[in-house]
Image (spheres, helix red, strand yellow):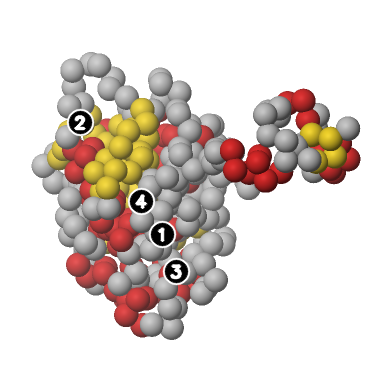
Amino acid sequence: MRFLGISLLSFACLGLGSPSAFSQTPTTFREARKNHKTNLFYAPESPPSSTFDLVHYASPLGPMSAYVTPDPSDGKKHPAIIWLVGGLSNSIGANLWEDGEPSNDQTASAYRKAGVIMMFPSLRGGNDNPGHREVCFGEVDDVIAAAESLSKLPYVDPERIYLGGHSTGGTLALLVAGSTDRFRAIISFGPVHTVAGYGQEVLPFDATDTQELVVRAPIACLSEIQSPTVVLEGTENGNIESLELMRKACQNPQVKFHSIPSATHFNILAPFNDLFARKILKDTDPTPELQLTEKEILDTVKLLSPEK
C-alpha cells in the first residue's frame, strides 16, 4: 500500500501514526510539499481572558505582541508594571499565566494577584514580530514603546508605571533605566554587568567589538539612571559577581544594590516580587519609594523556598 508515495513503514519510522489522518488529495511527496501551507508556532498563544488580553503595541519596527491584564472595570486607575522575562527569545507564551514553582517563579504573578496591572511585551525578532533579536540594544526602544502604549490604557495610572525583569530581562531593565526616566521605579533581579559573557555563539554581533558591548552594558549606564532602581541577586549562585562589580562602580544614589543571603538566582523571585507588589500598592506619594530596608530583606529571606 502506498500513500503520497510514502510507505506505511516510513510513516511508522517517522512517528506519524496512521496515514489516514492526512489529506488524500496529493499522490506524491512533491505534490504534498507544493500544496501544503505550514503552520508554525511563532504567534503567541491566546491567554485566558480572565488573566490577560493579547494586544499589540506600536514599536519602532511595527506592531508587536504583548499580554496585558484586562480592565478590572472598577473605574479606577491602577499602578502597572512591565515585566521582562529571562532568556534570549524575545517571545511570550503560555508559561506566563501558569502557576510557577515557589522556588523558581519566573511569571512574576505576585503583581497581578495583588492588583497591579501587568504587561509582558514580546520584543523584536520574538514570536511573529518584525525585526531581529539584537540582544539588549534595539529591545530598549521596544520596551519604551510598550510603556507608552500601556500608559494610554484608561485603567492605568500613567504616572505609576514600573519596570521589572529577571536575568536577561533584568539586564535589559537596567539598560532601559539608563535610557529613559519614563518609569516610576525599576526592579532588576540577577542582571549581568555586560553581555560579553553570553558568548559569541548566542550574540548576533561581533563580540570583539568594544562599542557593540558598551551600548549593551548596564555597568556603562548606571550613572545616567534617573528613576529609583533596585538591583538584587542571591548570594548562592547566578550573577552575584556582576552585582558586586556594578555596586563598586556605581556612585548614583538612585541605584541600590542588594546581595540577598541564602537566596539563589531563582528562588529569590517569588518572595521578593510579593514584597515589591505590596510596596507598589502603597507607593502613592509624589516621590517614589520602593527601596528595601534591612528588616524587609531579612524577613523575606525567611520565606525562600529550597530549589528543587
41 with respect to 215 (left or right): right
Q: How many marks?
A: 4
The local secondary structure at tag 3 comes to loop
Q: CA distance from mark 4 to mark 1?
A: 10 Å
Tell me which label, 4 or 3, sits earlier in the chain: 4
Q: CA distance from mark 1 to mark 2?
A: 27 Å
| Disc 2: CA contacts within 10 A as few (<14), some (14-19) or many (>=20) | few
Side (left or right) of 103 relative to 47: right
Q: Are marks 3 and 1 in contact (CB under 8 Å)?
A: yes
Q: Which residue is mark 3?
A: 204
Q: Residue at 27% of width from left, 53% of height from top?
A: 61
3D distance between C-alphas at marks 2 and 3: 34 Å
The amino acid beneath tag 4 is Pro
- Coordinates of residue 91 in the picture (x, y in percent): 45, 47
Residue type at numbered disc 3: Pro
The mark closer to the camera, 2 or 4, is: 4
- Decide: marks 2, 3 in contact (CB < 8 A)? no
Q: CA distance from mark 4 to mark 3?
A: 16 Å
Between 278 and 185, the residue placed more toward the observer is 185
> What label sits on residue 130 in the rendered view?
4
Residue 160 visible in the current orientation: no
Instruction: Tell me the amino acid under the disc marked 2.
Output: Leu
Pointer 2 residue: 153
Q: Earlier in the sequence, mark 2 or mark 3?
A: 2
Q: Find the distance from the CA under tag 2 to the CA under tag 4.
A: 24 Å
- Relative placement, left or right, of 237 versus 281 is right
- Circle 1 residue: 133
